[in-house]
Image (tube, grey):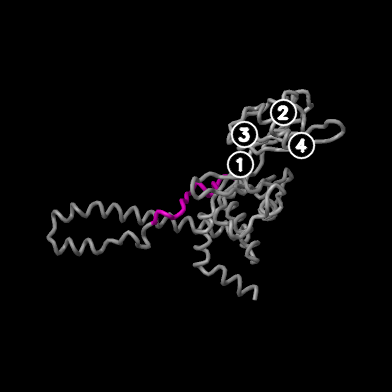
Amino acid sequence: MATVEHCLYCFETLSAYLESRKPMSLSEIEKSYGEYVKEVEAGVAASDKTESLEKRIPALRRVADSDFSEASSSSIPSSNSTMSLTTDTAATSTDSLPDANTPKITESPLFVTWNTVSARSGHTSLRGCIGTFEAQELDEGLSSYAITSAVHDMRFDAISKRELPSLEVAVTLLTDFEDCADAMDWEVGTHGLRVSFAERGRRYGATYLPDVAPEQGWTKEETLVSLMRKAGWAGRKDKWRSVDLKVVRYQGRKKDIQYPEYKQWRDWVKQRGVDAEEDEDEA
C-alpha cells in the first residue's frame, strides 16, 4: 500500500522543483523517516513518563517536608522541555511503517493527487491529479507524476511555491484490475473505475479513483454518468445505458498527508545537516 514515505517523497520532489534544488531520493527518505519516527516515539514515551511523575507529585508533597518538596518539583522537566511533545507536532505511528512480513512494493500503477486545504474550514479542493495504469518503479514514477500532476494538469494553473503550505498530497497505488461483467459489477467505496467506449466513430475513456464516488455521495449510476461526461460524452443522461461500455474495476491503496507533516520532518532532516552534506558533495 502507499505509505507516508511515498507522500513525503512527492512533497520533497515538488518542493525541490519549485526551489530549484536537488531532492532527496525515495530510499533516503525511507531511511530518515524510520529514524524520525523512532525519535518522536522516544520523545512521546519520555513525555508520558514525565506526566506520570508530575501526577504523583501532590502525593509526595503531602508526606515530605517543604524543602524536599521544592527539590523534587525542581527536578521535573517543564512543559517546554525537549522531553515533551508539543501539541503542534505531527502525529506519527508505527502503523505508517511497513510490516516486516509484507513484501516491499517497488513498482505499481499509481496516481498522485494534490489538494488545497482551506485554513478556515479544513475543506479540501482538487488541485491536480494525474497518474498511469502502467506499472512504474516507485522512485521514478512518484517523482515524475508528483510534478506532472502539480504543473501539467490542464484543468488547473501550475502550482506555485507560495501554495505549498496549503497543500495535501495523496498517493494511490492501484491493484486488483478486473473486467466487469457489466456496468454495475463493482462496489462504491471499494473499486475505482476505468471506462472506455466508442460512439459515432469517436473513442472515449476516463477513470475515477476508488475514493471519488463515496466522497461525492454518488450512486453507481451517477458515478458512471459523471465518468462518461468526464470522458467527453455529450449524450442524454437517460440514454447512458444504450452506450456499449467496457468497464474495468480496480482497487487502490491510498495514503495522504498535509504540508505541516512534511515540513516538520523536513526541518528535522535539516537540523541533522543532511542538506549541508549534499551541498558539499555537489560542490
Please state which amino acid type lies under the numbered disc 2. Cys
Mark 4 crowd level (few <14, some 14–19, many ≥20, 10 Å Cα): few
Residue at left offset 27%, top offset 54%: 53
Q: Give the distance between the C-alpha atoms of the residues marked 3 and 4, in whole angstroms.
A: 18 Å
Residue 27 magenta = no
Do callouts 1 and 4 mark residues in contact (Cβ within 8 Å)?
no
Q: Give the distance between the C-alpha atoms of the residues marked 2 and 4, in whole angstroms.
A: 22 Å
Residue at left offset 65%, top offset 66%: 20
243 horizontally vs 262: left or right = right
Per the rendering, the mark at residue 14 is: none
Please state which amino acid type lies under the numbered disc 4. Gly
State the residue position of label 2: 180
State the residue position of label 3: 213
Query: Nearer the N terminus, badge 1 or badge 4?
Result: 4
Image quadrant where residue 250 sits: top right
Query: Nearer the N terminus, badge 1 or badge 3?
Result: 3
Mark 2 crowd level (few <14, some 14–19, many ≥20, 10 Å Cα): some
Residue at left offset 35%, top offset 55%: 47
Mark 3 crowd level (few <14, some 14–19, many ≥20, 10 Å Cα): many
State the residue position of label 4: 232
Q: Give the distance between the C-alpha atoms of the residues marked 1 and 2, in whole angstroms.
A: 20 Å
State the residue position of label 1: 253
In this view, the mark in front (2 or 4): 4
- Residue 25 pos. (x, y %): 63, 60
Q: Which residues are magenta?
A: 85-102
Q: Does any portion of residue 138 appear in the rendered image?
A: no
